[in-house]
Structure formats: structure tokens, C-alpha cells
Amino acid sequence: MTSQQGRPGWRAALAAGALALSLGAAAQADSITVYTSYEEDELTAFLDRMRQDLPDLTVNVLRLSTGDLMARILAESGNPQHDVIWGWAVTSMIDPRISEMIEPYAPANIDRVPERFRDPEGRWFAVTGYMGAFCVNNEVLEARGLPMPTSWADLTDPAFAGEVVMPNPASSGTGYLQIASLLQMMGEEEGWEFLRALDANIAQYIKSGSRPCNVASQGEYAVGASFALRAIKNIDEGYPITMVIPAEGTGNELEANALMASSQNKEAAQRFLDWTLSDSAVDEYFKWKEIVTITGGAIPQSFLDAGLPEDIASVMWPMDFAWSAENRDRILAQWQEEFEDE
Amino acid sequence: MAVIAEDRAPRARLRANRHAPVLIGTLLVGVPLVVFVLWPLAAILLRSFATPEGLGLDNYLSVMGTPRFRRILWNSLDVTLVSTVIAVGAAYVFAYGVQRSLMPGKALYRFLVLVPLFAPSLVQAQGLVLLFGRNGLINRSFGTSIDIYGYWGIVLAMVLYVLPYAFLILSTALAVADQRLYESARMLGAGPWRIFRTITLPATRYGLAAAIFVCFTLVITDFGNPMVIGANYNVLATEIYNQVIGQANFERGTVIGMVLLVPAAIAAIWEKYLSRRQYALISDQSKPLEIRRHPVRDWAFSAFCGFVCLAILAVVAVVVYASFVHLWPYRMTFSLRHYRFDVQNGIQPLWNSIYISLMAAAVGVVVVTAASYVIEKLKSPATRWLYFLSILPAAVPGMVLGLGYVLAFNNPANPIYMIYGTLLIIALANVYYYHAQGFLIASTSLKQVSGSFDEASASLGGSRMQTLWKVTLPLIAPTLVGVAVFFFMRSMVTLSAVIFLITPQTQVAAVSVLLLEDRGATNQAAAFSVCIMATVLGVLLVVRGALWALGWKDVRLIR
């Protein structure tokens, strides 16, 4: 925030005329900087609605992927540049290095968010989320004569050898949530045994969470373990894929909002956070997100058409986010030791 | 010069004359290098020793003490050495063809080989997958089952990625030669191979070493290509990505960053040894090389260069093609739908990128020319350190440098904070990120200008400044235009360092590509990449037009 407010004019001169643009808006009092991991298209829709609802508030948004944003926030921790974190993985939010930068805040309407979706100490609240899903390429399936998989267990069928890709948990948050959900569901011993069986069929552990779905969509592999929204959007794009939510239950991640303690413009930041729980915002969430923690909307028809069940809670594994965060280093170390090929 | 001057000037004045410019020059070049290279790296270095119990070696022990680290280190060296040898070898032959033969198609080849420089890195890897992927064009057309992912995929992508850098340096090294040497050799009965071995090769030794250094460091620090096409082949650069982005563990990430600095340290020691043996190629008595027609040789070079250009072009062309079809590879009908960019801020990031790149070009050319002049012509005990700082950025992965900039400058008490969050700091980050490559192009050119020009100019009463302005700069001016173009092109597409420095107001085009790619809009990302490439081409044409209007008609923009 400090960079936006009261930035003296001579600095603009120093930084060449081209910068005039970036500084014009900064002079306004009600201007905040928001860091988010919402994807570009949903973000644009949310912001359009927000600007209608709060026309006098200038919100400057920087969008980076979950991992990039984590690195960015930690690097800037000596002098944070943002006021609000919006739509960002809870597993990252509860990292102690992040928690200590956050100021508890209870926005208006906080009661709309069920208690299990917010921090007991009021640091963050999660309104949206995403969950794991397979992208299965129908044409590749047909060409190779493979059955449609419906569960994680199906993917260990030797027929799928070399046809499955999944994200590398050491570099991708989506990858880690998939591994963590399997270990939580099956218990550690059985879970690792299952991962070993799965490993025999994995062609690549790809270093990004969305790429496995994208390469499966393009027909490079039969199955890409990724997340549901990616599958829905790729179906929408026209790719010949089927979204499969694994029958065992699927790993998921919540996207939370929080107020930075370092914010120089808390009043405006709080207004923004209040807005994230308004009817209007929730309305917009339901158009874009597969998981919305607040009731009061319906899942879009296109999501249902793509194969998302109406009762999402029935397929979601109740993730223990604290467990995931605490055991991360240990699990990744063991995973790398066992499954990293070359 | 010293000898001549001593006869004419009182000792005291001489000393002032000799030392003042050296001191001023060293400071003018050294201070910015310390601020924009050493300082961020020191911040990183400090971070690599940070442990919960204060400073210590724990991070180094935990990273390096495992068999996994040794395996990844070996993987990195393996893939880097092989890619470097292939790329430098091919670039030498290519540059030789361009500079020393009369092959047909020369002007076109010289342009095409540089295309990867202004293509966002995504294009390279994406193009290779579209061509050679399991469901790629080749496999689908010919029923083959090529699997590009893994070791050879990385090598292929890396060779295409670094080839233009090696070409730029080697082409500068091969551009000048003294006709008299070649004539004498021929008169003494030496055959073409012997002439190459005893005259050409030694004369380009410095350029060759510079090209090897640049390629080696580019390959070993790049994580984009191994990420997309490397499958499960892990290298040091992807391990940094794992640590910094995947696990938010800066400490372990920076340890690996430090390991990557070793090649730069070796190169700095090696360069002194090499420079001692490099002699100036043009002196006051030189005659420019006359290349004779030799049909077999010319066509052989033309065939080789044509093949290389075809490979480069195929990879880019397939991406451009994919950006114009409805849904690759399922609905191959023509469509413009990927060009309706629905990204936040629309095309504003493209404008930001252009501003940044123009700034980087202007600042970069001054910075690297000054650095190479001071290092070549104003020797002092500091020279070696200046050289080391000049080439050091090449060994730093962009992600690590960007992180260093945040750690060092994001502090209101720091004077540099005045420009933090602006386009200017992004431009400066680009200048210093690509400092080594720009510097090596400029100094390869400068090394070939004989010291006898300085002597002649001094004996005629010219000051060092006059010699610089009236003799040296005009001689290397064409190279400098090339250096500016180099900074412009790289700044348009570079990503990894700037990702830490962009703000909501200073989004850049390469990040827009990343955002589109992130949300799975691969073909829209390709379309945005095509717009970036078109912009670079457009700017090059404008510059060419401007130079033409100024009467500089035979300057080669991309050298």
C-alpha cells in the first residue's frame, strides 16, 4: 500500500513519462492493492461487478499463481505492497510466515460463512474453493481401447501404463493436495502403498497443476489429474474430454481472503472485504466457482453438464488443511525419494 | 601511449592524466554494477545462510548432503554440456557462413536465426510439443511414435533457445579479419584447413570462449524448457523453482542459486588467461578481408544454414498456425477467436513492455559499452572485479535475481526505493539480467580494435576522450546498434526476473502470456505471443526506417 499512497510527484518524473499512467490513480484516497490467485477470466468478472457496487473504490489487482504469489508475498514481507489477499489457497494462508502478517477482521455478514471455512481467530475466511478432478481424453481412450476410469483405483489398472499424468507435488499446490487427500483418505501406510501402485502408470509428474489437464485435452495422454474447473473450462473450449471426479472422494483447496496488518488504508480494505461477502459477490462466485462455501446460489448448468454433481459435499473429501501444512516437508521428501525417476 | 606521453609531459600531469580517467571510469561503471548486481546477490547470499537459529551452513548441508542433489547436479551438467557443444558448434558454422562465405540467402538467414530472441520462451517449448509431442503434427501425420519428453527434448529446446546468442557473439568475432594475414598464408602455401586452424580459429578464441560461457549459463539457469518438455528429468533450475515457488523455501532455493554462480567464477578466471592471448584483429594497417567466390563452399554453407533456419522457423510457424485454428488439433478450421484477448488491462501490458524495452535498450547500450570500454582500455587492479561483475548476471537464474531485487530494494530507507514499483526498475532489472550477453557482444567487438589507434590518436595530441568519440565509437557503432536491439528484444519477452517486480500498474506482455497459459488458454497465449513478435518486428522496421532516413543505410540492426 505504501507504494500507492502519497507517492510524491517527483518520483514519477524520475521514472520517465511513461509512468504517469500508473500514478494517476494512486493519488486517490480510496485506493487499495489486492493480491489474488483467482484466474484471469473469473477475476475480470468479479472486478466488473465490484466496480459497479463500489464505484468510488479503486482496486489495483495483481494476479499470480498460488506459488508465485507466496514467493512474492514472502519476498516483500519486509515492506508489504498490498492491503488485501483475495482468493488464495488456505494451505498457504496458514503458513506461520503469512499468518503473522495478517490482521484479524470480521467483515459484515461473516456469519454467512460456515465456521469450518474460517479461521477461529478471524484471520481469514474462505468463500470459494476448487477440487481435484481427472481430465480424460475420449479420443485417446477410444484409440487405445481403454475403459473410462471412475476412481483413483481405476488408474492403477496396468492398461493405463504410460497414459496418466499428474502434477508434481513438490512444485504444484494442486499436486500436493491430491497426494495429501489420498494419504488422508487411506491412512499413511495404505496411502503410500497406493501411490506406489499409481506410480507404475504415471508417464510424467508435470510441474504445474493445470498442465496435466491441458496436455490430456490436447491428446498427449489419456488422463490428466488436475482440478475440476480446469476440466470444465476445457470442455467448454470444445476439447473432447470428460471430467471425472474420483469415486473415493476428491482432494480440495479453499480460497481465502484476509486483511494485511501493514495496510495503510484499512478502511478501504475492509470495505472491499465486506463486499466479498455481499449478495452481489456471491452471485458472481456461483457463476464461476465449483465450490462456494456460502449458500444462496445454484451451480451453473454448464458445470452440471460437464459432470459436476449437484451435491458437491458428497464428493469432497473433508480435508485437514492443518495436517497438510504441517506434514508437507516430510511427505514431499519421502515422495521425492520414492517417485522421482531420473 | 604511455611511452609517447612521458616524453612530452611533466610527470605529475602525466600521473593525473593517467589515473583520473581510470578512476572515474572505474567508478562510473563499478558503482551501478555493485548496486544492481552485487547488492541483490548479497541479499540472496545472506538469505542462503539464514536458519531459524541465526546464520549457519544448515541450508547448504541439507541441500547438498543428499544423493538426490548429486543426481540433479549431474543431470544439469550433462544436459548443459551437450546442449552447449551442439549449439556453439552449429552457431560457429552458421556465423562462418554468414561472415566468411558468399552463400546465397545470407541476409535472410541472418535474420531468421535470431527469431528465437524475440519469441517468448513459451513459444519454443509449445512449438516443439505441437510438432513432436505424442499427439503432435509429426506423429499424427506419419503414424510414428516419437516421444519428445525428457532428455533429448530438453537438449533440442535448449539448442534452439541459445543458438542466436552464440551466433551474435561468434558473428561479431568473425566479422573482422586482416586480409594481409590471409594473403601471406596463401602465398606461403597453406591450405584452407591450415589457414582456418592457425589464423581464423585463434583469432576468434575469445568470441568462442564467450559464446561457450553464455550458452552454458543460459542452459543451466533456464527452467522453462525443462518444465514443459523435460518430463521427469530434474535439473538444478527446476529444483530452484520447486523450492522457491513450489515450497516457498527461499533458503534452500538460494543455496542452489549460489551453486549456479560457480561457472561464472570459473569463466572470470579463465578470461584473463584467454585475453592475454587475444590480439587485435584490426590495426591501422589492416585491409578488410576479401571473400572470394567458391561455389561448393557457398552452397554447402547455404544448405546447412537453411536447415537450421528451417528448424527454427518450423517451431515458431506451428505456434503461429495453431493460434489461427479453431481448436488445435481437433478443429483445424481458420479462426480469429484466439485474438479476442479478454485479459485484464487488455493490451496495456504490451505498451508497458514497449516502454520498458525502449528504456532497457537505451540504458543497456550505454551501460555495457561503458563497461567494456573501461575493462578493455582503462586497466587497473579493479579490472578483474569489474569483469567478474559484468558477466556474473549470466549465471544468475532470473527468478533469483528478481527475488534479490525485492529483498534488496523493497525498503523505504533505500534510495533505489524511489523507483521501486515503476517501469524503470523493471527496465533496469532487464539491463542487468542481460548485462553479460550485451557486454560480451560489445567487448568482443572492442577487443578487435587495435591499441595502435589510441597511440596514433594520442601522438597527434588527441585526448583519450577524443579517441573514444572520434575513433573507437564509430568503429564499433554498428555493433552498438545491435546491442541496443538485443536489449530491446529480450526485454519484450523476458519473464522470470520481472515476475517479482510487476505491480498492478506495471503489467508486462510476457506476464499476460503466462496468465493465459495458466488458465489453459494455450492458443490464446500463442496468439498473444504472436502479437509480441509482430510488435518487435514492427519496431525493428521503424528503427530501420529511422536509420535509413538518417543516412545510415548499411547498418545491420541485428548483428
Image: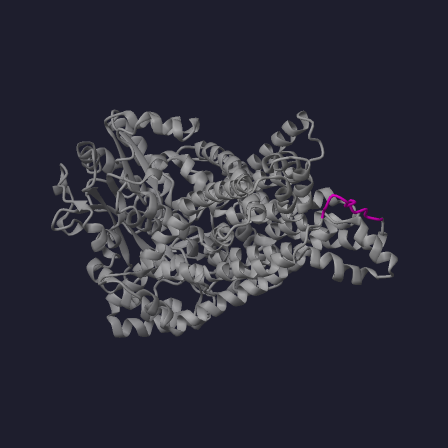
Count of marks, rendered view: 0
Q: Is residue B170 above or below residue A287?
A: below
Specify whether residue B371 is in view.
yes
Choose between B293 and B338: the one closer to the eye.
Answer: B293
Is B313 inside the magenta-drawn segment?
no
Q: In the rendering, at what x and y percent does residue B162 appear?
A: 58, 53
In the rendered image, residue B557, in percent from the top left (x then y), is placed at: 64, 38
In-image side of B434 versus A336 (left or right): right
Q: Is residue A98 above or below residue A111?
A: below
> In which quadrant of the rendered view does residue B514 lie?
top left
Give the vertical position of A85 relative to B550 (above or below): below
Residue A285 position within the rendered picture, expressed as x and y whole percent measured from the top left: 27, 40
Give how far across and how far down residue B541 sits, in percent: 63, 32
- Horizontally, residue B513 falls left or right of residue A95, namely right
Residue B287 sits inside the magenta stretch: yes
For residue B247, say whether it is visible. no
Q: Which residues are magenta?
A: B282-292
Q: What secondary structure predominates along the stretch shown in magenta? A: loop
Tell me where residue B498 sits by quadrant.
top left
A296 and B547: which is toward the camera: B547
Position of A253 compared to B76: left or right?
left
What's the colour scheme? one colour
Looking at the rendered image, the quarter that the N terminus of chain A falls into is: top left
Which residue occupies the foreground of this view, B128 or B448? B448
Please report the residue visible at 85 percent of the width from the left and 49 percent of the height from the top: B293
